[in-house]
Amino acid sequence: MAIVLGPNRYGKAETRLVRVVRDGDRHALTDLTVSIALAGDLAATHLTGDNTGVLPTDTMKNTVYAFAKEHGVAEPEVFALLLGRHFVATQPQIARATVRIESFGWDRLGPHSFQRQGDHVRTAAVTVDAGGAQVVSGISGLVVMNTTDSEFRGFPRDRYTTLAETGDRILATAVDAQWRHMPSAAPGWLASFDRAKTALLDGFVTTYSRSLQQTLTAMGRRVLETDPDIAEIRLVLPNKHHYLVDLAPFGLTNDNEVFIAGDRPYGLIEGTVARDDAPPARAQWYL
Amino acid sequence: MAIVLGPNRYGKAETRLVRVVRDGDRHALTDLTVSIALAGDLAATHLTGDNTGVLPTDTMKNTVYAFAKEHGVAEPEVFALLLGRHFVATQPQIARATVRIESFGWDRLGPHSFQRQGDHVRTAAVTVDAGGAQVVSGISGLVVMNTTDSEFRGFPRDRYTTLAETGDRILATAVDAQWRHMPSAAPGWLASFDRAKTALLDGFVTTYSRSLQQTLTAMGRRVLETDPDIAEIRLVLPNKHHYLVDLAPFGLTNDNEVFIAGDRPYGLIEGTVARDDAPPARAQWYL
Amino acid sequence: MAIVLGPNRYGKAETRLVRVVRDGDRHALTDLTVSIALAGDLAATHLTGDNTGVLPTDTMKNTVYAFAKEHGVAEPEVFALLLGRHFVATQPQIARATVRIESFGWDRLGPHSFQRQGDHVRTAAVTVDAGGAQVVSGISGLVVMNTTDSEFRGFPRDRYTTLAETGDRILATAVDAQWRHMPSAAPGWLASFDRAKTALLDGFVTTYSRSLQQTLTAMGRRVLETDPDIAEIRLVLPNKHHYLVDLAPFGLTNDNEVFIAGDRPYGLIEGTVARDDAPPARAQWYL
Amino acid sequence: MAIVLGPNRYGKAETRLVRVVRDGDRHALTDLTVSIALAGDLAATHLTGDNTGVLPTDTMKNTVYAFAKEHGVAEPEVFALLLGRHFVATQPQIARATVRIESFGWDRLGPHSFQRQGDHVRTAAVTVDAGGAQVVSGISGLVVMNTTDSEFRGFPRDRYTTLAETGDRILATAVDAQWRHMPSAAPGWLASFDRAKTALLDGFVTTYSRSLQQTLTAMGRRVLETDPDIAEIRLVLPNKHHYLVDLAPFGLTNDNEVFIAGDRPYGLIEGTVARDDAPPARAQWYL
């Protein structure tokens, strides 16, 4: 028996970049957090501290800022691909680069004035190796609620089941969705993102829900139906419970009007919706 | 010398309430976090554990939910006043009630579907005693940025000063503002809030800024000029530093295009703007 | 009527400092977050953007680091006093400086190896003006629990009261305490802190509690009895509710054995314990 | 082409449990957060909302509390196995259960008084299917620092590299480690955890570090050398940068004494150390 080095990678996480584009008095603004992870033949530094092949993570940070100047950062997917390809192409020991970007939206208030949005974060996660690239786009933190058209019934009961069946409940979640694009896809990324976001919201709003799983599937299906360039989508949906308050002790009724918004615990529904002919993923992108 | 009990209060903090109003198929939604603090003659419980005068904080929570049913929660200021007056009126030992509410906005997606806003929180803090009430409304978490029209020059230099003067920098902050209403004010609270928010944004956007202090004053002044029912306003503005990246080592220029968005440290500017004839505050509301 | 500038201050918040003292191979470590706020005649910058009297917050940050080298940071109270006096003494327009420090403890693992503690933060908040200084020391984040010897009974009941009286409950809180020293006090600050922390824990552990208010008073009293140099103490104690689980549906008893640890809402008990002959505070230090 | 359901699971996340064991006046305390995820044949609910096979997540929560009473929660690994086996054994449609537990330590202050530790969290993640179980134990949030015996040299330089080589720097990280036990392992879990924690700390303290990768490997190797029941270990180590402050402008030297503790960006080093004859993992446990 010997002790050996297994899978490993390294990089610079959460580089905070704000990029301004100045067109005379009228400016545009991009606000990104960029995380880079590189993998390849990194045994030497792990075993002996020989850093011959270890590009400093400080250099990765510098590259983010320099590329922002040289190439702009119009689309997170494009910027991530650019960075990922750069490291794989220029670092002999690096076989695979993963670049993950969070993009924070800002609304315009004036020619050079902006207000930060807070209702969702747009994400891109790109994996690049010698054979090609995989692009996963996503959204997180999109909190939505249906105040009716949700039930939960017909479930099995065991010794530990006390939950009552309900034909009318609040359904609320914080959408965390990531979708893998077809290898050949090179859409207008912002338009693609907007289509996906709209499809997710439509799926949530228009589905009469017998379970959050059913809603999840409907949301994912809607995205795939809308965009042929998307191979599969992964949704992670917390069931943000809203408990009906018992007002009977106060002589009051509560016809689904007054709720406790719970923190913990919460349900957690995770699922994937895919095309059956989608090419396999180049790199695993969820656990 | 004796050891004595000094100022004290108690209550239930962060009761999470979602209130749905159902008008047939069309629903409306209010999402509040309510914190209550009561003060008065509470010496007995502090000194001997005699709880004769200690209304349980659990009862305060119940009251929030019951009042939400009985009275609705259309405006946070009104709901806070209702709660505060109730406790002062019904609990003999309570001389003063403070009710603080955070209100989270939701945008409509459908007749009974909603998406949570994330770009600011509306607040109300009400203090009630036998003589009357004080209403403070506010906003927090409103993140704004000007990408130019901001300078910082003419400051004193001492042995520890290394900062260069600048005639063009990013000015970014997360607005935390609270404003005290005139004792007689009973406006449409939502309209009043919207006016104040607009005035704050206008003040930020239209001020050519020589210091964040100057911008703060302009923002506060704008609110007071807009609304005669507001006696004074307190602003707490972090200076969210954006550092210009030195791209010269890479043979690149940086004409205010590429910035590091810093986390810590940050500047913190706190200031009050008031009418000189404003009546004094009934209760201290900032430190 | 005119619109006027009211109370204001500014400074650099959350400067992160790690100071290493090297005694040959054996090192010592201090880890502080320093926040500075200066007040005085700052009308010019607020009204016209004239920064003649506005020492940059960047200079405050530099001063923290330079003073750390020149003077060391052995005690947060001493370091805060040094900084506060410096700004009041050297900046003509500054009448008052407030310096707040959070100190993070590290346990020794070896001559130059350390592990960060996580069970509390030590704080110091110093206010300096021309007439003298006020020193407030404190502790936050100290989470403690008694699994018995706590009851809550004898409270008033109104229409909204459903809480059952209990003779045996869990009492848990996260201690946030600040204590103001006598103006003349210049103790060994670490020894003073350790005495206060011990007294707080002793007060919590040894008090049979009929209310968290009673426990609060006992904890504060214990601190004052232990240390004649402390004039008064302010405690803010969340009542971290632990709800007894109803196991009857599963045919099980629950003799105070299985609890839900709740997040929100929580009780919040705030109180002050003071010497009746304590000199008044030089600056208000809690709301 | 058809749109199909891919991998999915569901469960109750973050059930907060405090379990008290009463031995007369002397109590013991366990504080756990339990998250459960079940996978299997869940197509019906995803596709049609048929919940015939969907045990409510509310029942999972109840089961946690009931099992805490019936079986106790002495070791997180044992409690997780018990829960996981229960769901796989009793729910026909469930093929695999994953139970993840965070355990928060408390130090004894008295017979029934405790203070919460804050310097690390102990974790257990168990996967159960018909064929057996996989147990992964871990630690998170263990923050450690070496103030010397760390260098970073000999790295490649490209156009974007500005970092200077250093022969003496601070090395600081927050250890997040998980280790997979041999399938046959059934150690005293607490003793096993303590051995691993000690080995991790020893590896960190005693390694002269030429890179954080080298330190990571040494830490992992130490754990495997110490405990033959551990098959492999995964470490995720942020490089918490401490930047040397340039004090030259103030006429001061800085011989590795005064540092800025940075927040973002940070390096992130991820690696696995394994026995070469370790049996394969039953379920993937890291990405």
Image: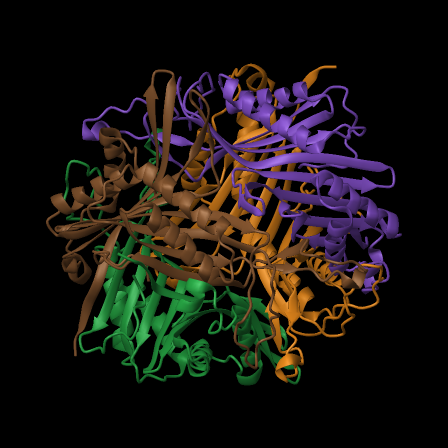
Chain colours: A orange, B green, C brown, D purple
Q: In this view, does B33 lie to the left or right of A171?
A: left
Residue at image location 77% in from the left, 40% down from the top: D127
Q: Is residue C145 left or right of residue B256?
A: right
* Image mark count: 0
The image quadrant that residue C247 belongs to is bottom right
Query: Considering depth in this image, is A246 or B50 the residue closer to the camera?
Result: B50
The image quadrant that residue C60 belongs to is top left
Q: Residue D82 at x, y = what percent?
A: 79, 44
Residue at image location 35% in from the left, 41% down from the top: C193
Is residue A275 at all visible to an observer of this figure?
Answer: no
Of all residues, the one furthest to the right in this rendering is D92
The quadrant of the rendering that contains the C terminus of chain D is top right
Q: Residue B273 at x, y = what percent?
A: 23, 68
Q: Residue B23 at x, y = what percent?
A: 62, 85
Is residue D242 at all visible to an observer of this figure?
Answer: yes
Query: Considering depth in this image, is D118 or C15 the residue closer to the camera?
Result: D118
In the rendered image of this protein, does residue D266 appear above or below residue A116? Answer: above
Q: Residue B74 at x, y = what percent?
A: 50, 80
The image quadrant that residue D269 belongs to is top right
Residue at image location 21% in from the left, 30% down from the top: D249
Q: In this view, does A116 lie to the left or right of A53?
A: left
In the rendered image of this protein, does residue B274 appear above or below residue A141? Answer: below
Query: Considering depth in this image, is B27 or B132 the residue closer to the camera?
Result: B132
